[in-house]
Image: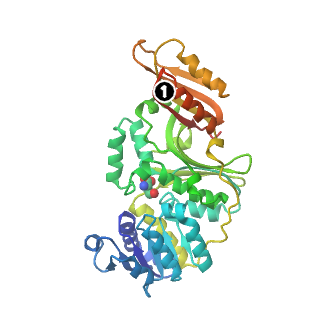
Amino acid sequence: LRIGLVGAGNVGGGVIELLRMNRDLIASRAGAPIEIVAAAARDVERAKSRHGDDLRWTTDWREIAAAEDVDVVVELMGGTGEARECLLAAIGAGKPVVTANKALLAERGDEIFARASEAGTCLMYEAAIAGAIPVVKALSESLAANRIASIVGILNGTCNYILTSMEKGEGSFEECLAKAQRLGFAEADPTLDVGGIDAAHKICLLGRLAMGTPLDFGKVIVRGIREIDSEDISFAGEMGYRVRLLAIAKRDENSGVELMVYPTLLPQGHIMAKVDGSMNAVQIASDAAGETICYGAGAGGLPTASAVVSDLIDIACGRGNVPGDAAPLCKIVPAPEVRAHSFYMRMSVADEPGVLSRVSGILAEEGISIGSVVQREGDGEEPVDLVMILHRNRFGCVLSSVERIGELGQVAGKVKVFPVETFA
Ligand code: HSE
């Protein structure tokens, strides 16, 4: 199988390395050698010095998509502009494509899946979701007989690394982010990681694959981790929880699907709360198989290359996937209607009479029940933190009460609210 590689960054470099490292084993599993015959990189001299000049290097991906001697195009350049043109050109030329580009598939995937379907061409994207973890194959093959009730994922290693490092007192948000960037998990633009957008791209694709949700990225609820500070982590810990950025696709009682990425409090004993550092995990609840969990490296050159090359082996063996009819099977639940098990709410309030009753009055008017209240004793002068756990409710209702509470004169700064899930 002759490969045209587009993009020689962290993951592209990993693919080159892996195909060299396990050359014979991969050839025996694929039934034939898998070789990169041409590669495109923005900086060819740099790519040559890193990966050798025995490949045919170019700066122009168009040469790769059109090359007669390229059987499969592997797109690892990222972004949603040229990467889209590259995939469409390769599909138009009848070449199977493999991509790790979750942003492109989540935001413009309808067009790309449709073109591949019309052309009868394979489109493979195991590497787009959770790096090395074989979740696309788990859902489309191993669990194919199941109706999937929910998927709960830790799908962004950078965010998990930052949250767990802050939990261990290893530094501020900015320090932990800088370390994640140095270690190579973060996106070129890390605002996609910390803003929750990268995880949202992935859950959008998982929802489509497992439950038939439309690829409507604008309807995914997305909240990143910038608002979480060490005080939240410490309050959560005191109450028996840990904070993780969860990506959730869950059927509701009306056959809609909730799609959401949110910093979420989880009981400390929950298996997803134990996912540490840059690791990813995906917990799938299905009707026949029950609960299954996949855990592993969600980022990095070689781990992500492992997923890319597994797709290449599938294509070589005739097991490549041509997208079928992608008519959506269900609706995405509108954001205000989505429910959480309970909510964590934290605000800074004046330490004076009547504040608690004003806050609880608003909650009562909105029909929100309070589960518990924590306030650290103040001196009556400085504002104090007030933390509440609110019982199960809709996001819409909770967020509108938060807005009202934020307008009270005794409340300083922003009122924070995050869901709590137990998955019990
Ligand atoms: N930047 C992502 C992460 C990896 O930190 O998990 C690629 O999706």
Name the image quarter holding residue 51: bottom left
Residue 63 visible, this angle: yes
How many neighbours does mark 1 have within 10 angstroms: few (below 14), some (14-19), or many (20 or more)?
many
Q: Is residue 129 left or right of residue 362?
A: left
Residue 84 in picture, x, y percent from top left: 48, 70
Residue nearest the observer in this picture, 46 or 204: 204
Q: Disc 1 on helix, strand or loop?
A: strand
Residue 392 in picture, x, y percent from top left: 65, 33
Q: From the image, which quarter does the C terminus lie in?
A: top right
Which residue is the site of mark 1? 347
Reply above or below: 53 against 181: below
Q: Residue at x 56, y 28 (%)?
A: 404
Residue nearest the observer in this picture, 145 or 101: 101
Reply above or below: 158 against 116: above
- What is the total number of numbered labels drawn onto the structure image? 1
Residue 215 in picture, x, y percent from top left: 60, 60
Dot 1 beta carbon under 8 Å from ligand 1? no
Residue reaching furthest to the right? 254
Residue 278 in picture, x, y percent from top left: 42, 49
Q: What is the three-letter code of the residue carrying label 1?
A: Met
Q: Quadrant of ligand 1?
A: bottom left
Q: Is residue 54 left or right of residue 360?
A: left
Q: Residue at x 51, y 27 (%)?
A: 407
Residue nearest the observer in this picture, 374 or 267: 374
Residue 309 visible, this angle: no
Q: Residue at x 58, y 17 (%)?
A: 357
Q: Residue at x 56, y 56 (%)?
A: 217
Residue reaching furthest to the bottom? 68
Protein image colouring: rainbow
